[in-house]
Image (cartoon, rainbow, N blue to C red):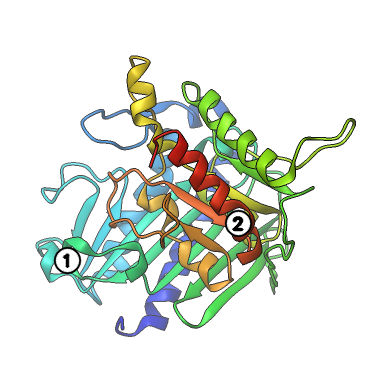
Amino acid sequence: MIRDRAHLLEQIRELHRQIRAAVVAQTEAVALEQLSAVEGDDHAYEGDTIFAIDRVSEEKLVEFFERVVAPERPMLLIAEGLHDTGFGEGRLPLPRGITPEQAEVRIIVDPIDGTRCIMYQKRSAWVLTGVAPNLGEDTRLQDIEFAVQTELPLVKQHLCDELWAIRGDGYFAQRYNRLSGEVQPITLRPSHSATIRHGYAQVVRFFPGTRAELAAIDDEIVFAALGAPLPGKTHCFEDQYTSSAGQFYELLSGHDRFTADIRPLLEQVVLKKGFRLGICCHPYDVCTELIAREMGVIITDEYGQSLNPPLNVETDVSWVGYANAAIRAQIEPLLLKSLRDRGLI
């Protein structure tokens, strides 16, 4: 178990609050064109394009860990945007001068998941952090002992949620009022429905190049589960929320019943079309999976096994989320059959 876990958890929550305040202040003050300007696009590694708004949170991130956390415990920070550290892309041992082997904990962070959502003021983005004991290079998602997920609200939005979970101790959630400063505990409940009928259920297809294949898989699953649509009626709905953490939130709050992000499986499909696969989900995007797990939401990999990628910034991650066991029983066999029939797994 991580030493003095409650203290470190509170430090992480304070970091999230500071990032939220900084991002909200920046979005209120800076024009859209500046926030969406590309600051860096390093093709030397499999990271995301870095926008100006990301720099706001990244600067706060390193400064906070170096000043507040590292003096109390040696740590390895894992986050996108950490270049030229001498320890590999996205890795920074703190305090300066230690090696990754000397770290007590590995802390993986996505300071803004859903950058485009917030910079275009379409939907909330999220700050994500998972903390695991340092088990070396094979430290993985299932080793995370506690996780924190904090909403970055739109400028016009005054309520925003804060979620965290400790492995084996359940989840905690509260809602912050930006206008009054008031904080209220809240209860979030995943859907108890036994079917996706009339609910939100989707296969992720954000970007051009793979939409036809992913939509075909989506339709195949829905028709196999629910039959042919009736005239004037609909089977279910979809929501392409361009944030993995946002999709997790939709599942654990009862809004969505099924989501599958299987973009990495399409690599061979797009190669045959003459181009490379674009951006995919990475471990930092799913580092708060523990919160969903503690709430009873089921998150698996593409084979139906526990989601368990290594904690790094490079690995492409496929994940599948079910609001409950009944939804999983309805959908998982159909999804796996569709993937096997296409030779994707």
Above-or-below relation of 37 to 87: above
Which residue position is annotated with label 1?
136
Neighbourhood count class around disc 1 (C-alpha, 10 Å): few under 14, some 14–19, many 20 upward: few
**Residue 68 coordinates in the image, percent (x, y):** 32, 69
Q: Quadrant of residue 240?
A: top right
Labels in figure, total:
2
Closer to us: 181 or 258:
258
Q: Secondary structure at mark 2?
A: helix
Q: Secondary structure at mark 1?
A: helix
**Residue 233 coordinates in the image, percent (x, y):** 87, 36
How far is disc 1 from disc 2 in space, using C-alphas?
A: 30 Å
Q: Which residue is located at x 14 percent, y 61 percent? A: 96
The kind of residue on which mark 2 rests is: Tyr
Which dot marks residue 249?
Answer: 2
User: Going by the image, does 123 lie left or right of 168?
Assistant: right
Q: Quadrant where the C terminus lies?
A: top left
**Residue 238 coordinates in the image, percent (x, y):** 68, 40
Determine if residue 193 is in view: yes
Q: Quadrant of residue 160?
A: bottom right
